[in-house]
Image (tube, rainbow, N blue to C red):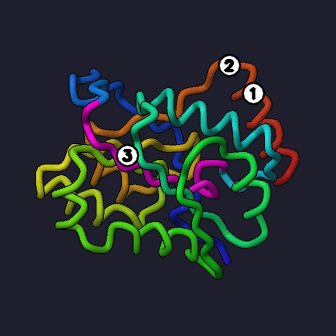
Amino acid sequence: MRIKHLQALPSIEVPETPETDLDLDPQVRTLCLVDIENMTCGSELRHAEVARLQRRIEMTAALNESAQTVIACGPSRAEVVWLGWKGSAKRLLGEGINGADIALLETVEDIHWVANRFERVVIASGDHIFASTVAALKALGVKVLVIAPPTGLSKQMRLAAGPDLKGLMFSTAHEMNVMVAQRKEAA
């Protein structure tokens, strides 16, 4: 069975959005939700790859040490993800289809509490399941940044994020080529 929202969309142009004072202010309370399985585009993970992905997300979102991070994955990747992700982060386990996504959504279930506690929410996922949360947070005045993987950005998420969408930064073009080659080998 093919899951439509995880398919790569052909040649998506992700516009660069200018950084604001809110993006870089260390006093701004930031919540960062990481859907690691969506961000890795389904590739096999090793500790070093998780750490590299963490650096890319932090760089793309201009996260500082005061950001509160929540990362979720399925049981088959838990050990690698939890040991590979450095520093403090709440680590969640979700079982079944969309289990990790649902675990992350439960973190922001009380949307008003999130809006009162955080000025900024970063969602590292292109999965459609987060689109309504992005829209609801924006409606409450929360600055939301969506970081999308190179593939796996759903149309609903792209529309909900609007100009607050950033592509995952790669430190070198070589890393991107390696990832594309791995995906082709797996297919």
| Tally of numbered discs | 3
- Looking at the rendered structure, which numbered label has been put on residue 66? none
For image coordinates 73% across by 72% down, the residue present is 75
Kindly identify which residue carries mark 2: 173
Q: Is residue 124 magenta?
A: no
Kindly identify which residue carries mark 1: 177
In front here: 164 or 137? Answer: 137
Magenta region, residue range: 27-40
- From the image, which quarter does the C terminus lie in? bottom right
Q: Position of residue 48 (x, y in %)?
A: 79, 38
Tag nearer the camera, 1 or 3: 3
Query: In the rendered structure, which amino acid carries the disc numbered 1?
Result: Asn
Q: CA distance from mark 1 to mark 3?
A: 26 Å
For image coordinates 53% across by 59% down, the residue present is 90
For image coordinates 82% across by 46% down, the residue present is 46
Q: Earlier in the sequence, mark 3 or mark 2?
A: 3
> Quick one: label 3, few (<14), some, or many (20+) residues within 10 Å?
many
- Please state if 4 lies on the left or on the right of 173 as rendered: left
Residue 13 visible here: no
In this picture, is 157 found above or below 107? Answer: above
Q: Quadrant of residue 156?
A: bottom left
Query: In the rendered structure, which amino acid carries the disc numbered 3?
Result: Val
Q: Quadrant of residue 154?
A: bottom left
Kindly identify which residue carries mark 3: 122
- Please state if 60 lies on the left or on the right of 130 as rendered: right
Query: In the rendered structure, which amino acid carries the disc numbered 2?
Result: Ala
In this picture, is 20 found above or below 112? Answer: above
Q: Position of residue 186 (x, y in %)?
A: 85, 52
Q: Residue pushed farthest left?
A: 140
Q: CA distance from mark 1 to mark 2?
A: 6 Å
In this picture, is 171 found above or below 102? Answer: above
Asked whether the beta carbons under mark 1 and mark 2 sit within 8 Å of each other, the answer is yes
